[in-house]
Amino acid sequence: MRHIGIDPGLSGAIAVLTDESLQIHDMPVMTVDRNGKAKRQVSANELAELLYTCSGKDCHVYCERVSAMAGQGVTSVFSFGRSFGMIEGILAALKMPVTFVAPATWVKGVGRGPGKDASRSRAMELFPENQDLFKRVKDDGRADAALIAHWGRKHG
């Protein structure tokens, strides 16, 4: 069985967890020109291709259920929602079984502690053979995706 964890957003990732291995894919992004400014956004084509290669009868997707947070700017909330909607649409088009899980639920379920580096630390504990995947500060999206997949394997 393949448990696929998705941490949505531009710095998110997709983790594919089986009994034998853990694979991590950074969220595919591209740069587009918007009103004369270069902006990054999730690449729908690359994401669809990646998820298609992971799809099949023996998989289940666990995606973090995201929402707007107080204090976020309108533009960033719209961009984040656009990314989440793209993920949701691609999963539906591929007819992949998906469970949307609240951050508080998976965080508590995997025993992640508080703090900025908590996800990376917990991922290194759970996946010691893959510690290199989580060694950089910016690898927190990778760690979250792996922990979401781990939560899915335990609770799905």
Image (cartoon, grey):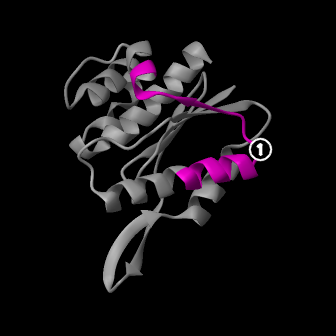
42 is higher (above) or lower (below) than 102:
below
Q: Residue at x 65, y 52 (%)?
A: 89
Can you say which quadrant of the picture contains the N terminus? Answer: top right
Between residues 155 and 142, which one lies in front from this camera angle? 155
Query: Which picture quadrant has residue 2?
Result: top right
Q: Report x, y in % for residue 54.
A: 67, 44
Magenta residues span: 85-105
Residue 97 magenta-drawn?
yes
Q: Is any atom of residue 10 visible in this view?
A: no
Residue 52 highlighted magenta (yes or no): no
Q: How many marks?
A: 1
Circle 1 sits on which residue? 95
Question: Is any atom of residue 17 visible in this view?
Answer: yes
What residue is rendered at 41% in x and 53% in y? 80
Q: Is residue 136 left or right of residue 125?
A: left
- Label 1: few (<14), some (14–19) or many (≥20) C-alpha neighbours in 10 Å: few
Between residue 13 and residue 133, name the one nearer to us: 13
Classify mark 1: helix, strand or loop. Answer: loop
Residue drawn 30% across the image and 81% down it: 37
How far from the left and from the top, in percent, is residue 156? 62, 18
